[in-house]
Amino acid sequence: MNQHSVTPLTPAEEDPVIDKWLALLPEFVPGPHFEDAVMARVRVPAPSWVLAVQGATRALFVGKRAWMWAGGLAASSAVSIAAMVTLFVTHWVQVETAWSLLAGGIMIEAWRAAVALTVRAVSAGFAMNAFWGLNYQAFVLAGLAGGLVTGFSLWGLYRMLRIDTERISLNASR
Amino acid sequence: MALSEQLVTATDQEVVQWAREGQERAYRELVRRYQRPIFSLIYRMVRDRERAEDLTQETFVKVLNALDSYRPEYKFSSWIFKIANNAAIDQLRRKELDTLSLDGAPDATTSDRREGTSIQLADGAESALQELEARELGSQIERAIAQLRPQYRSCILLRHVEGYAYEEIAEMLELPLGTVKTYIHRARVELRTMLEPLQE
């Protein structure tokens, strides 16, 4: 019997025979995964706090408020750009000096790193050559093979990603 | 108190409210509360386990996806039983079904189909003999109920098995109160006649 309040039988309704037979009726049970099967087809709404946040966010961008937000963002961007331009124009010499120092420093560091990396790679190659007794043709061949493998790998990766992207966009358009 | 504990003791209205607020556990609680009585009613109406399970699932999906339209001043149980009964009656209108058997539908030709359409009783610690007797007896009662007209069947099951008041049954089945009383009276008379041999 369920959670609802059960209305008792009135004296006129009482029938020991019928009551006896109906009391024997078993309760049937649906299959073992019934609950999950139902829940898979039920649209559970997002929790109330999520809805509240969504509502508040949406409300921010509705009607006049949306224009206010857009205006505010545009104004702050304009002010930042104006401040930068003013700084460049009024303090051009200082800006140029600072930039050349900064850029020069970065460039020098980048150059040093590239040179070190190349030297290390070349010396590692020569060391391997000395160890295995390979000649330079083997190096060239290995380099070519490596380049080809890398190229094919990149091409395969590109193909796979392109196919998946096409599938996703197809599914999205359905 | 944790929500899971609260759910067990909460009223249907409270559980529905939590479900509306997006609590999945509240949805599951409603399914747990009503899956047996709803399935039992539908099964006794359509007399086919697979169809009964499909219709019970449809009933729950329909009810749970329409919780926003539920009005708390009405009983949730009345609402779900009404939808379940309508689903069963519609099914009966679409197709005339065979009599109920504890061993599976008479049209079952394969063991899978027989298993799928056989009745699974709720868990009970009975001996094999008691189970056999109960099955035999239960089978005869089920057969008697199955021979009633669908309208009589709904009324007698809702009244005598689920314990609803005449007024609630009238509301659920959208029938006049007098008609419900007549149906239940006639159903009882027919059942008594059919089950008389069992008394001897």
Image (tube, coloured by chain):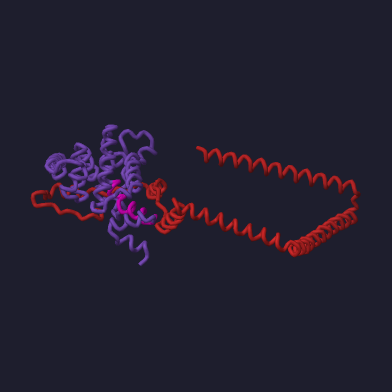
Chain colours: A red, B purple
Q: Going by the image, does A35 lie left or right of B167?
A: right
**Magenta stretch: dominant secondary structure:** helix
Which of A105 and B181 lies nearest the eye of the viewer? A105
Q: In this rendering, is residue B8 above or below B151?
A: below
Q: How many marks?
A: 0
Horizontal and vertical percent position of residue B99: 26, 36
The N terminus of chain B: image quadrant: bottom left
Q: Is residue B42 visible?
A: yes
Which of B144 and B6 lies nearest the eye of the viewer? B6
Which of B195 and B150 lies nearest the eye of the viewer? B150
User: Residue B171 occupies which quadrant of the picture?
Assistant: top left
Q: Which residues, given as a range, are shown in magenta? A: B23-39
Q: Is residue B131 visible?
A: no
Q: Going by the image, does B127 lie left or right of A126?
A: left
Horizontal and vertical percent position of residue B95: 29, 32
Which of A172 and B129 lies nearest the eye of the viewer? A172
The C terminus of chain B: image quadrant: top left
Q: In this rendering, is residue B3 above or below B119?
A: below
User: Residue B22 occupies which quadrant of the picture?
Assistant: bottom left
Which residue is at a point 17% across and 53% down the rendered structure image? A7
Horizontal and vertical percent position of residue B163: 19, 51
**Which residue, as the protein is rendered here, is positioned at the far bottom?**
B1
**Which residue, as the protein is rendered here, is positioned at the far left?**
A12
Horizontal and vertical percent position of residue B32: 33, 53
Is residue B30 a member of the stretch shown in magenta? Answer: yes
Is residue B21 a member of the stretch shown in magenta? Answer: no
Which residue is at a point 26% across and 40% down the rendered structure image? B86
